[in-house]
Each structure stands twice: as structure tokens, then as C-alpha cells.
Amino acid sequence: MNAGGPVRRDGDVAVFTFDNPPVNALSQPVRAALLDSIEAVDADRAVRAIVLAGAGRGFVAGADVREFDRPPAEPMLPAVLSRLEACGKPVVAALHGATLGGGAETALACHYRCASGDLQLGFPEVNLGLLPGAGGTVRLPRLAGWQAALDLMTAGRPIGIDPAIALGIVDRRVDGDLVAGAVAWARELADSGMPPRRVLDLPVPPSRPAQFEEYLRALPASARRLPAPPRIVEALASAAMLPAEAALARARTLFLECLASVESRSLRHLFFAERRPAPDPAFVRDVGRAAVLGAGTMGSGIAISLATGGIGVTLVDAKQEALDAGLTRVKSTIDAAERKGRLDAAAATAARARVQGSLTLAAVAGVDLVVEAVFENLAVKREVFGRLGELAKPGTVLATNTSTLDIDAIAAASGRPADVVGMHFFSPANVMRLVEVVRGRQSSREALATAQAVTRRIGKIAIPVGNAFGFVGNRMLYAYGREKELMMLEGASPEAIDRALQDFGMAMGPNAVGDLAGLDIGFQARKEWQEKPDDPRFYRVSDRLAELGRFGQKSGRGFYRYDGPGKERVPDPEVTELIRVEADRLGIKQRDIDPGEIVTRCILALVNEGARILEAGIAESPDDIDVIWCNGYGFPRHRGGPMFYADTLGLSGVVDSIRALAREHGNRYWEPAGLLARLAVEGATFAGWQAGRAAG
Ligand code: 3H9
């Protein structure tokens, strides 16, 4: 690592360059170098002005998140920035690319700011469960006002150069050589003889005392319940009411509270778990064009992802009507992304031009990757792969989007199993970031690396998983779903189950998810499951609803009714009655079940199954499981994923709870997984186990 880069002189202007690849994070040596350099140039009579710039793709992406789990190391950023702001000579920030978090706060401690057109300036701390802890909450409102500061810091989304200038955060745009422009401006400022313009000395904009309270109340309840968003609002309210020094101190205290919170630790865990190493380029095959088989919701979603990710794609469906509908869906989704500003006009035009349709499988002849998304039935898929084996050119990666079926059985039908992998996308595929890349027994390293590389290229997260029914995500889903189904028979209503798990933080309750996905899908998949538990209670309620044609939203009825004018979700007494009858038939006595029991049983079932999956080598690491569940199943990010959550509960407590459940409900499903039991006895964690394995 280059510790902050040297100070270079451009005549009478000193240029300090942040040079700490890959993102110029403000690690301790960088802070120390900045502090020393500022002291030195402030004292150097030959220097009349200072420019701060960043090497590489951005200015500074923020504090070094890795340091947050270590003891604090001097000099601390707030003190460095106070010294920077106190500098007696004009200090100009030359901003480009990622200027985030502590990087944006560094820019605010400079006296002036210029930027190039690629600027991405923001305060993403909230995504890590933090607040801007180096003076941002006190400085930003003095430039941009309270509303902008509240919005930028609670949303965490960066802004580009135009809004940054309009809000008064950036003073001017530099086209051409940014640092040369900044140096010329710094020299002008020195020539003008004007005193440095320190943001902390600017007047505090007017605010209404109730403004902050109102803002907090208007935030979604899910945000208000977390530690960071209310503290961001409180830090800004303090900046409105207290003198600058006191407001800085208050913000620092609030920052440290957030830093110590389990929510922030969980979000930081995911930050690193989601950043996975790229596959070895030596094994990655070129993918210029792909084909997607099946123009249904899943197939067209995959086609959209490929096209917007820069890969030409042919959508194939044997039925003209289905193909037309699929192509229309692709086009209208890209149009909508353009209208909403998620894609600029040029990118949208290019994406639309990358998509073609075909009614014949022969269209796969020229492509480098096929993603099959036809009906979830082994016989159908085997037939398709038999044809693909003949039609695709040698080396084409043949991926199936099955969510549960045996990849090896599909691969065998192709006659070239080395080229076959699973690419399990999640619905809606153009929105969800997760892809499980499934390793068949004979999948080649090249096919796996190529599937992973394509996934990254289209902006998604590829998690390698083994071939077992349901792979990782759906296999765990069966344990989670099993418990909610049992509890319905035992007396919990579908809506009580959903409410309890949503209050825990799940994006949606499992019954509402079932209705959205279609209860016929799971019904169908369970029919194909060879080792399904021989238990008449297993998914009895879901199966019964599907047998009655209550498929969920698409049929107007499922666990809930959707036949009101707005198709809103409404509890259905018929379902309560149906469950009661089934419980009677199975001899289950119904009782009251409290939300705590619902959460404990569903979440511990997940954890226990996750541990089994690790033991069996179906998932490579607890981190992978956490990424899968947070990105594919709406597990609350602030709890870090099921395995991290178990660590925060303490594994011996988890095992005690599982044993208590076994005493109450029998040990058919509640035998603690061997790995979990062992780690609990050792007083260890999943994270420690993973680190131990990585160390060899
Ligand atoms: C903060 O600033 C708090 C302050 O208010 C107060 C302090 C007192 N630290 O994402 P990529 C690594 S909180 C350490 O794949 P991209 C990342 O792990 C911080 N490491 O690249 C990866 O490592 P590896 C607020 C970091 O081009 C590599 O860099 N700032 C950090 O897709 C490449 O990352 C943020 O939250 C970091 N801050 O995206 C910004 N950032 O190669 C977080 C990245 O070993 N960063 N790494 O896997 C980002 O949003 C993206 O990384 C960025 C680049 C947009 C910059």
C-alpha cells in the first residue's frame, strides 16, 4: 500500500494525492500522511495554496471499513479534518469518481471544491449502520441546507456533479485536466488574498424545531427501528441547535454508538461477504452472445439482465404468442428503466438492440452461453439438454435455471456434462442480485468460471453451491417453510406467521411470498423431490391450497384473498377453516402461538439447516449462506444473514434452544446439526470456523 502518496509541488501550490488502491480508503497510514503533510505545507512559506486529489478511479471512498473491527488508531479522522480546515492557506478539493462517506467529509473540510463530470458524491454510512462520523452532519447542512442533508444521509445514495453543484456542495465543474484546473483555481484564490472559506464558519441555515421530529416520523418504520437513521436525524438536529464544536462532539458520540451496534456489525459483515473475488480469468470463456430458453417471466427477466449488462441475447420460445409476450416484457421493462432514469438513453437503446427472438432451438448454434428457463420438470429439461448437446457449438456453456432439480441428471442428457452448470436466478430476475452457480459432478472449471464471470458482468452476485435438492437457498427454505406450515396446523394463522416474521425484519412473510410466487410452483417442485420427509403434516396446508386451485395472487386466492378492488391482501376465514379441518384430520390440537415462538422456530430451523449444508459441503462458507439469504430471500440485512445472526445470539444458546424445541416437538426435525453442536461446545462461532478454514 502506498501510504497516502507524496505531496508534489506545482510551483507555489502543493498537491496532496490520496493513493491507497483500490478505492483510496482513509486507512491509518493515509490519515497520518495527510496530517503530517498539512502541518508541513501550512508551515512552508513557499507554498501558497493546497490541492487534495485522488489517484485512480475516485477521490476517496471513505473510512477503511476493515479498521472498524480493530482498536482505534490515531490520528482519528475528525481531528485530521479539523486540522485540514484550520489550514491558513486555501485548500481546494479536486473531486472525481467515488467521493463517499469520510471521503465526502474530507472534501467538506476543504475550503473549496471542484469536480469532474464523473463525480459520485454521497454518504453511504447508513448502509453500514453508521452515520457520517467525521463532521459531515455539521458541515454539509451549512452548504446544502437541512433537507438535502437529511435526504442524502438517510438514503445513502450518491449524487452526480449537477445536483452537487446545485446544492452548493461543489463550487465548480472542471472539464479537462481536473488537477491542473484545481491548481490554477487554488493559485487564483491565493492571489485574491481572501481568507480561506471554512465551512464550519458559514452561517447555520434556519430550521424549524419540529422539522427533525417530523422527518423522523416520516421515515419508514423499518428504518426508524434501526440504530443509524434516528441518530443521523439527531446528529443533524444537534447541528441545528448547538454550537459547531458541541455538535461535532455529539455526532461523534452517536457515531460510536452506531459503530458498536450489532446492526452495524451485521451490515459490515455483509459488505465484505458480498464482495467476492473474481473467478480466475485463465478459466473464463468469452461470452459475446447468449440465448435464453423460455420466454416466461423468468426467461425474460434473465434476458433483460443480460441485455442491460452488455451481452447480446436471443430469447427462444417454441410458441409465437409466448415469445411475443416475452419480447414485449423485455422492451417495456427497459423502457421503464429509461423513463425512471435508471438507464440513460444511450444505454437503453443499446440494451434494446441486443435482444432478438427466435422460435427455434437452432438459434443456440452461434451463442457462447445458453440459459435454460423452461418448465420445472426433469423430463422436459432433459429433453431440452439432449437437443442442446447436439445444437450448441463446442465450448458453449449450458446453464439450467432449475431451482431444485438434479443438475447431474440434466447434464447427463446433454452428452457433454462438463459444459453444464446451474445458474439459479431469483424472481424477478432483472431485479434480484443473486445467482446460485451450481456445480455438477462433472462441471468443468471453465464452465463454472464463465457462469460466475457473466453473473458479475451483469451486476449480480454469483455464489457457488453444490448440487443437492434445492441447492442452498431453497433447501434452507424448506426447513423454514416446514416450521411455518407446522405452526399453522398447530393454530397460528397465516397472517400471524407473516406479521411475526416481518416484525423480525423479513422483507415479506412466507405466506405472502408463497402467494406472490404461486403456490403451484412449490407444489410441483415437491412432487419431484425424492427424499421429501415422509410426514403427512409436511407442507400440508400449502399442498391443500394448491390442490384446490388456490395458487395465490394469480388466481385471486391463496393463503389470502386478493379479490378486492385494489387486489389487496386480505385474510380469508375459509383458509382458517381449511387449516382447522386439516389439523383435526391429523389429530393436531390447535393452540395460541406467540410471535416469539414463530420467529424462534422458523429462524432456528434455517440456522440448523444452514449448518447441515455447510457440513455436507453444499455451501462453501457461512458467508455464502448469509449472502444468499439476504439477497435471495429478504432476510434482514441488519441481522447479517442467518449464520451471522446465530453467531450474534451465541451458538451455545442456539443449541440449547434447539434442544428445548426437540423436547417439546420431538427430535425428528430438531436434532442439532453436528457442526453446530461442536462449535457450541467449543464456544466458537461460524465466522471463526470460516476464518480457521481459510487459514488452512
Ligand atoms: C465512513 O466513511 C465513515 C465516516 O463517516 C466516518 C469515519 C470516522 N474500506 O466494491 P468494490 C474494498 S464509512 C475498505 O468491489 P467497485 C472492497 O472490499 C465508509 N475497503 O469496487 C474490495 O476489496 P477486495 C463509507 C473497501 O469498483 C475493493 O475495495 N464508504 C472500502 O465495484 C473494491 O471494492 C462506503 O461505504 C472501504 N471503505 O465499487 C463506500 N470500499 O478487492 C464503500 C471498498 O479485497 N465502497 N473497499 O474485495 C463502495 O461503495 C464501492 O467499493 C465503490 C467501488 C463504489 C467505492
Image: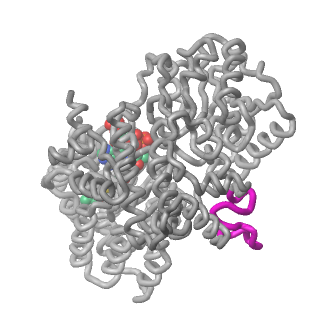
Is 568 within the magenta?
Answer: yes
Q: Position of residue 565 (x, y in %)?
A: 77, 73
Q: Position of residue 124 (x, y in %)?
A: 40, 57
Q: Is residue 524 above or below residue 495?
A: above
Front in this rendered view, residue 199 or 529: 529
Q: Quadrant of the C terminus?
A: top left
Q: Quadrant of the N terminus?
A: top left
Numbered disc total: 0
Q: Specify whether 154 is left or right of 264.
A: right
Front in this rendered view, residue 35 or 580: 580
Quarter-of-image position of residue 228: bottom left
Q: Bounds of the magenta span?
A: 552-569
Name the residue at 34% across, 70% down. 137
Q: Is residue 543 above or below residue 562?
A: above
Prevailing secondary structure of the magenta residues: loop
Is 54 within the magenta?
Answer: no
Q: Position of residue 314 (x, y in %)?
A: 73, 29
Q: Specify whether 90 is left or right of 324.
A: left
Front in this rendered view, residue 655 or 19: 655
